[in-house]
Amino acid sequence: MGTIANLALAMGASYSEQRLVEMLKETDNEILQAVGKEAMDEDGFPNWVRLANLDYVVDLVSSYTFEEWAELAKAIFNIRNIESFVENEMYILFEEFVGLFNIHVSIRTQPEDLEDETEY
């Protein structure tokens, strides 16, 4: 296993915010859903509307540096191969600790664009 610095560099080089966002959407991540619900409430959407039925954008900003992520990864995972970890387990780590990201949901759909409850 390489150093924390090597792991941090590899994580930073292959991190894709878009890939993480897609994973969170696919798994109906509860934190993403909670942040989305707040955004929907602020924008005046009815309670029956689901986030998944809207056009929305997610911004993720990590409150951790890649070095801190690497330290956490090393503590939790048995990393034998940095490339393999970065490709396979890194996003599991991010999803598990998604609370360490600042998550912002911007909803593009307007409440008045919704037809009625029967479509959703």
Image: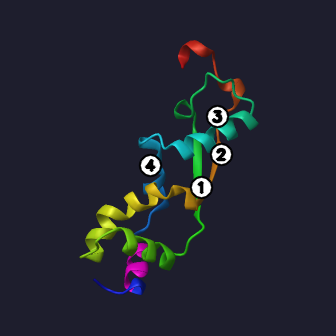
| Residue annotated with mark 4 | 22
Task: Tell whether 51 sits left or right of 112.
Answer: left
Which picture quadrant has residue 50? top right
Of the residues shown, which amino acid type is indicated by label 1?
Answer: Asp
Say which quarter of the image contains residue 106. top right
Report the Cα–Cα distance between label 1 and label 4. Answer: 12 Å
In this picture, residue 107 sits left or right of residue 68: right
Q: CA distance from mark 3 to mark 2?
A: 9 Å
Per the picture, the main secondary structure of the magenta-coloured stretch is: helix
Residue pointed to by mark 3? 109
Q: Is disc 3 placed on a helix, strand or loop?
A: loop
Q: Determine whether, in the image, residue 116 is placed left or right of residue 24.
A: right
- Badge 4 marks a residue whose secondary structure is helix
- Amino acid at pointer 3: Thr
Q: As drawn, which residue projects farthest toward the top?
A: 118
Q: Which residue is mark 2?
A: 106
Quadrant of the rendering where the N terminus is positioned? bottom left
Q: Earlier in the sequence, mark 3 or mark 4?
A: 4
In the image, is residue 12 above or below residue 99? Answer: below
Distance from disc 1 to disc 2, alpha carbons, whole Å, reads 8 Å
Residue 114 at x, y percent in the picture: 64, 22
Give the crowd class for mark 1: few <14, some 14-19, many >=20 residues within 10 Å. some
